Image: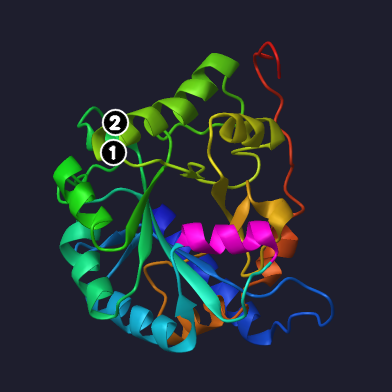
């Protein structure tokens, strides 16, 4: 196993131990409504993938414990200040073909809607996100099929470049171009975005302003948390699922056991000095 993968699994074990001790503070906090983040669901082992049988057990649990709704509906409730207790949403980042071949049939069995955030250059065959050819990209026809069965398609940039620090022109291309491409190919408005990597300082308030100006109604980060406010619409917190998450760990995550990580994320630098200060920003 590569050293990076070993370090990731070790960190995950340490986080899990702390999660079992964490007790969320009481008081006037936002209603829990976890947005779960997956990448790959495949028998092909990877540090960002989940085995199909594990994924099914997690979805079975989630749909029993929560009312899983489309992310765009959760965003509407946040915007209106009418978020209902017990809601959750499921998302996928990047646009791997196994989202269609493996995850889709499982989600249909449990009548579970989902959102996939697509890297458009990946789907167009212009770039590869990982070295394993088995982890290829979705096709346009597969994305159209997914739209027909309660999936929402959002943008995850054009080439998966980290957005923090990009010059203004390149930043706008990474955000606006995938929206135009997806809308042209799929024939539906694209109103949701997810930041590549999604931590601080991978995006900042300037990045979020560009996302808003390009016509998106909300954007997902990978900042941790099960609770979001209307003020978080362009930095929505999510619960990221890892390859070594058993059902116990998954339950801890969606019920807020890992929300202590949000405190650590607030300590990360919010700003990254930009190499080029674009006109108008």
Q: Is residue 92 magenta?
A: no
Disc 2, SS: helix
Of residues 125 and 191, the one nearer the viewer is: 191
Report x, y in % for residue 102: 19, 66
| Label 1 with label 2: CB-CB less than 8 Å | yes
Residue under the image location 55 percent in, 47 percent down = 219
- Let me know if residue 159 appears in the view: no
Q: Residue 246: where, in percent of width, then height?
A: 40, 81
Residue 77 among those drawn in magenta: yes
Which quadrant would the C terminus be assigned to in this image? Answer: top right
The residue beneath circle 2 is 184
Residue 14 locus on image (x, y percent): 58, 73
Determine the image quadrant of residue 87: bottom right
The numbered mark at residue 148 is: none
Residue drawn at the location 80% of the way across and 80% of the way down:
25
Residue at image position (19%, 62%) is: 44
**Count of numbered labels shown in the rendering:** 2
Counting other residues with Cα less than 10 Å from the Cα at mark 1, is it few (<14), some (14-19), or many (20 or more)? few
The relative height of residue 223 versus residue 270 in the rendered view (above or below) is: below
Name the residue furthest top: 279
Relative to 3, does residue 58 appear above or below in the rendering?
below
Q: Magenta stretch mostly in which secondary structure? A: helix
Residue 127 location, quadrant: top left
Left or right, 205 with reference to 51: right
Q: Residue 90 versus residue 263: which sits nearer the camera?
A: 90
- Which residue corresponds to mark 1? 187
In the foreground, 191 or 44: 191
Q: Quadrant of the N terminus?
A: bottom left
Residue numbers of the magenta segment: 71-81
Is there any visible trace of residue 193 in the rendered image?
Answer: yes
């Amino acid at each position: 196993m590569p050293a990076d993968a070993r370090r990731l699994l070790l960190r995950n074990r340490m986080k899990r131990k702390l999660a079992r001790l964490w007790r969320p503070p009481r008081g006037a906090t936002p209603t829990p409504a976890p947005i779960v983040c997956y990448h790959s669901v495949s028998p092909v082992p990877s540090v960002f993938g989940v085995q199909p049988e594990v994924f099914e057990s997690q979805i079975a649990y989630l749909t029993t414990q929560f009312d899983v709704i489309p992310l765009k509906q959760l965003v509407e409730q946040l915007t209106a200040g009418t978020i209902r207790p017990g809601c959750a949403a499921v998302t996928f980042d990047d646009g791997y073909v196994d989202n269609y071949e493996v995850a889709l049939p499982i989600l249909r069995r449990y009548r579970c809607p989902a959102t996939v955030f697509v890297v458009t250059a990946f789907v167009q065959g212009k770039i590869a996100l990982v070295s394993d050819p088995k982890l290829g990209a979705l096709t346009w026809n597969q994305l159209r099929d997914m739209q027909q069965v309660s999936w929402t398609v959002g943008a995850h940039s054009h080439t998966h470049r980290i957005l923090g620090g990009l010059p203004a022109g390149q930043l706008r291309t990474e955000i606006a171009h995938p929206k135009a491409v997806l809308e042209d190919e799929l024939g539906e408005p694209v109103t949701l975005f997810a930041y590549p990597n999604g931590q601080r300082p991978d995006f900042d308030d300037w990045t979020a302003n560009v996302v808003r100006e390009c016509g998106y109604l909300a954007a997902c980060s990978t900042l941790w948390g099960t609770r979001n406010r209307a003020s978080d619409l362009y930095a929505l917190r999510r619960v990221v699922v890892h390859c070594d998450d058993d059902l116990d760990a998954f339950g801890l995550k969606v019920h807020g056991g890992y929300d202590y990580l949000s405190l650590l994320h607030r300590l990360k630098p919010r700003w990254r000095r930009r190499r080029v200060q674009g006109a108008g920003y």
